[in-house]
């Protein structure tokens, strides 16, 4: 994810879709589609853990498939 800090911020602030993890109710999955990435057109996928006093990114990577789970928010 070298050089993708700005896109990570854009995805967290303005995602296309946010899904709750099926395996951990404290984890939310943020997705935003980008036409141009280091690996062709893909979604930027960011896994965020939400604790009572803290929030942090577990991982982030480009993918072409979205995970299943409860949709918390979706851009219309």
Image (cartoon, helix red, strand yellow):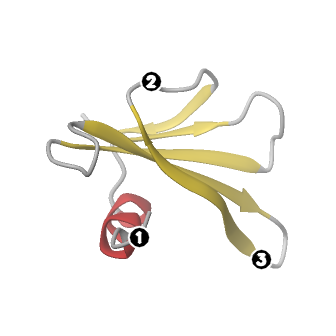
Location of mark 3 (residue): 54
| Callouts 2 and 3 close, C-beta under 8 Å | no
Q: Secondary structure at mark 2?
A: loop
Q: x and y percent of residue 4 in the render?
A: 35, 68
Q: Is residue 61 visible?
A: yes
Q: x and y percent of residue 75 in the render?
A: 29, 39
Q: Residues within 10 Å of mark 1 (few under 14, many from 20)?
A: few
Q: Nearer the viewer, residue 48 or 25?
A: 48
Q: Nearer the viewer, residue 8 or 22?
A: 8
Q: Secondary structure at mark 3?
A: loop
Q: Residue at x 82, y 66 (%)?
A: 51
Q: Secondary structure at mark 1?
A: loop
**Disc ID at residue 12:** none
Q: Earlier in the sequence, mark 2 or mark 3?
A: 3
Q: Is residue 75 visible?
A: no
Determine whether 38 is above or below 41 in the image: below
């Amino acid at each position: 994810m070298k050089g993708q800090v700005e896109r990570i911020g854009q995805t967290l602030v303005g995602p296309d879709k946010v899904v709750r993890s099926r395996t951990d109710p404290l984890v939310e999955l943020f997705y935003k589609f980008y036409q141009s990435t280091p690996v062709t057109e893909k979604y930027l996928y960011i896994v965020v853990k939400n604790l009572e006093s803290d929030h942090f990114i577990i991982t982030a990577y480009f993918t072409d498939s979205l995970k299943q789970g409860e949709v918390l928010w979706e851009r219309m």
